[in-house]
Image (cartoon, grey):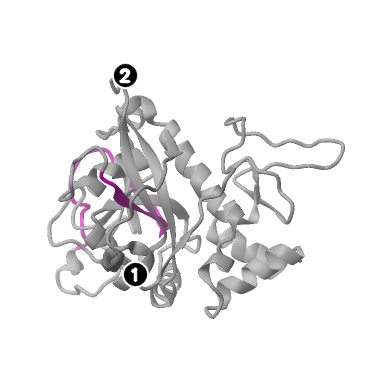
Amino acid sequence: MGCFADAGAHVAADDDPAHWPGVQEVPVPATWLPESREPRVTDNPDGEVRCERCYQKIDGVRCYEDGKCLHFGCASEDVREAVANGQRLSASESIKHQLREDCSQTMLDCFGEAEVSSMLVRFHNGCELNKARYGFDLEVARVFVIRNEEIDMRFERGMKTLRTKAPNVKELYHGTSRAHAKAIISHGFRLPSRAGMFGKGIYFAGTPLKSWQYSMKGESQSSSSKHYMLVCDVALGLEAEMRQAGVPKRSGWWRLFRTCKSPFTLEADSVVGLSQDQGGALRVPEYVVYRSCQAVPRFMLELRERKRNNRPT
């Protein structure tokens, strides 16, 4: 599961993530998780409606995505954009949307408490859904909002060059070391020099528990040490499913024209490695993009591992 721990002693001031360019620490909401953890939409005589993703009351605009009723902060980027362009927003949501476009405002204004709470609830749910497969829990000590206008613009341009008009943006997790997280926040993602299970791509997971192993690499392994994980928007576009390890086949002209934008003969924008439950080889699904402009970090979490007594299945 994902829960919160006392922040404890912070790192040295000169290396504290709160002092990195483009990063702002935000307070952890005092009441981020409702008593009931089951998804629900509640319509009562007073008209109260709860979001089916974060389970909190919807006070402003209702967004509808994949048959679910969501509040503005929980909807995907393309749904939020459509709502903002084609629907009259409540005063609070209009202000929030305006602040997203106003780089002179603070990031705390851009990401209100409700949006931070929603992200943390999704983090918790991602852990809960897969906790039986892993022998540990994750505690959240600190939350940081990331804002890099150059990377945001690169991401917006990248979505317009996908092979499908629907960018298929998903909130996914990327575990990495403190040094690499700082570099990603400053300059954006970069393709690795070595190939992974599905080639030289940028890898993400839908559950934080999967990404945690990469947060631990090259870092202190003590029980009290804290590590970092990026919460990202990833434009998957048209997905190609992979059941086994291997590099996606490339078109014959790829070697001649290395500047082409997609490496897939089946004209896909990303790879989804399937889990064993889906007929694949992985414990849980993972997602791979092959262009750095298809991913943008939105939040960074400082985490700590907590062992459980039961063994993973």
Asked if the stretch drawn in magenta spans residue 207, the answer is: no
User: Which disc is residue 20 wearing?
Assistant: 1
Residue at the location (45% across, 52% down)?
171
Residue positioned most to the right? 45
Apparent side of residue 63 relative to residue 268 in the rendered image (left or right): right
Q: Which residue is mark 2?
A: 310
Cα–Cα gap, marks 1 and 2: 38 Å
Height in image: 279 above or below 110? above
Please state the extent of the stretch shown in magenta in the rendering.
225-251
Q: Residues within 10 Å of mark 2 (few under 14, many from 20)?
A: few
Residue at the extreme top of the image, as rendered: 310
* Foreground label between 1 and 2: 1
Q: Position of residue 29 (x, y in %)?
A: 56, 49
Screen quadrant of the N terminus: top left
Task: Inspect the image, locate mark 2, and give the three-letter code of the amino acid beneath it.
Answer: Asn
Report helix, strand or loop for mark 1.
Answer: loop
Residue that protrudes farthest toward the left in the picture:
194
Q: Secondary structure at mark 2?
A: loop
Which of 242 and 156 lies nearest the eye of the viewer? 156
